[in-house]
Image (cartoon, helix red, strand yellow):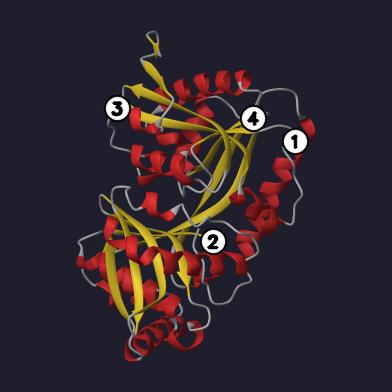
Amino acid sequence: MTDSTTAVRWFGRASDLPPVRGALPWHSNQFAAAWEAASPEHILARHYLHLDDPSQTVAFNLVTSSPFFDRLLHDAQSQLAWPAPVLVAGTLYAEYGGAGGANAHSAATTLRHGRILARDLGASALVIPNLSPAQLDLWQQARQADAAVFTDLSFTSPVDDTGLRGFADSITNRHTARDMLRQHRRGTEAGLRLVPLRGTEMLAALPAFTRLVTETADKHGTALYNPRMFAPLAQVPGAILLAAVHDNTLVGGFLSFVHKDRLSLWTAGIDLTRQRDLHTYTWLVCESVAYACDQGLRVLDAGRSNSRYKRRHGLTGQPLHSLVHTTGHHPDLVAGLNDLGNRLARYAEQGSPVADGSSLR
């Protein structure tokens, strides 16, 4: 179906979408197709909005339950409940949302059509998740949301030709820097080696990685993943599994994406029975820095969660907010969402209570 007045087109399947170059991996057609194939969320309906100028696609998912939202409630110790399904532009699982909104016009167009679709589908709200500060301002200027909910911090660090040594030198606390390098050295001496598995190269390793990532997530309180979701994600441009191998056995890995000059570490699986003696998580962080340097990349995006660990290791956090546009008068819902955001902000400020830092989101 074509909307001639606003140069948009609607599609029912990701496979029918025109080619686009997403602003980030989570805005690509391939990510939309992967989420269509094996999302861990319970999605009642999917609608894809394609904007011709600039060329981009927005995946609207009508969600009845999301393990990621359950994780946010768990972290915040909140019991917020939506009165009806929620229409989400993309997914909370995507580190950065904004539905790929590149400018004020595309944000306004996306909001206009998304709010109409939310009402038509009987959704309680339209949610634009995980907006960086710049994107938050852009979307709020397009239309003020009923609630702007803090959801997490995302952490990045510049990478240059000095590699791991330069990364260590940027850490303010010298004891922390020395300890990081010591853990990396001990992991290497114990026999850890990095095996980068790009795209479909990772398929053979995914059963083992899925077991590790599921165990890691469960340890933190919520089952975030399903066994089928990772194979489709291997098709996303730039997908790479940074695998930590010991005695030919996978003992950890970061499922990541390379995009332009950025290495984004999206989710981690760690063999928790070997974490203490191999220092796998910190070893992988160090190897990720070295890999990014070797590939000529300039930004390490270490993802969300584990804010205490990441701050201590010199990464810079920026807040992510999710905008909620309700479809009716829901003052109690808005109040609950504001309270959830405040609780999550306090949680992020205090840092995860998990000391070994063995999860990324």
- According to the picture, the residue beneath numbered tag 3 turns out to be 18
Identity of the residue drawn at 61% across and 65% down: 218
Identity of the residue drawn at 61% across and 51% down: 67
Q: Quadrant of residue 5?
A: top left
Identity of the residue drawn at 77% across and 31% down: 331
- According to the picture, the residue beneath numbered tag 4 turns out to be 125
> How many numbered marks, from 0 up?
4
* Upstream in sequence: badge 4 or badge 2: 4
- Which circle marks residue 30 in the picture? none
* Upstream in sequence: badge 2 or badge 3: 3
- Which circle marks residue 333 in the picture? 1
Q: Nearer the viewer, residue 335 or 193?
A: 193
Gap between marks 4 and 1, in whole Å? 10 Å
Q: Which element is circle 4 on?
A: strand
Q: Is residue 211 above or below residue 262?
A: below
- Horizontal and vertical percent for residue 311? 50, 68
Residue 351 in sight here:
no
User: Looking at the image, which residue sits at the far right?
Assistant: 332
- Which circle marks residue 305 in the picture? 2
Q: Tag 1: Cα neighbours inside 10 Å, few (<14), some, or many (≥20)?
A: some
Identity of the residue drawn at 38% across and 24% down: 50
* Upstream in sequence: badge 3 or badge 1: 3
292 sits left or right of 14 in the view? left
Eye-nearest disc, 2 or 3: 3
Eye-nearest disc, 3 or 1: 3
- Horizontal and vertical percent for residue 278? 43, 86
* Amino acid, disc 2: Ser
196 sits left or right of 256 in the view? left
Q: Please identify the quadrant where the N terminus is shown.
A: top left
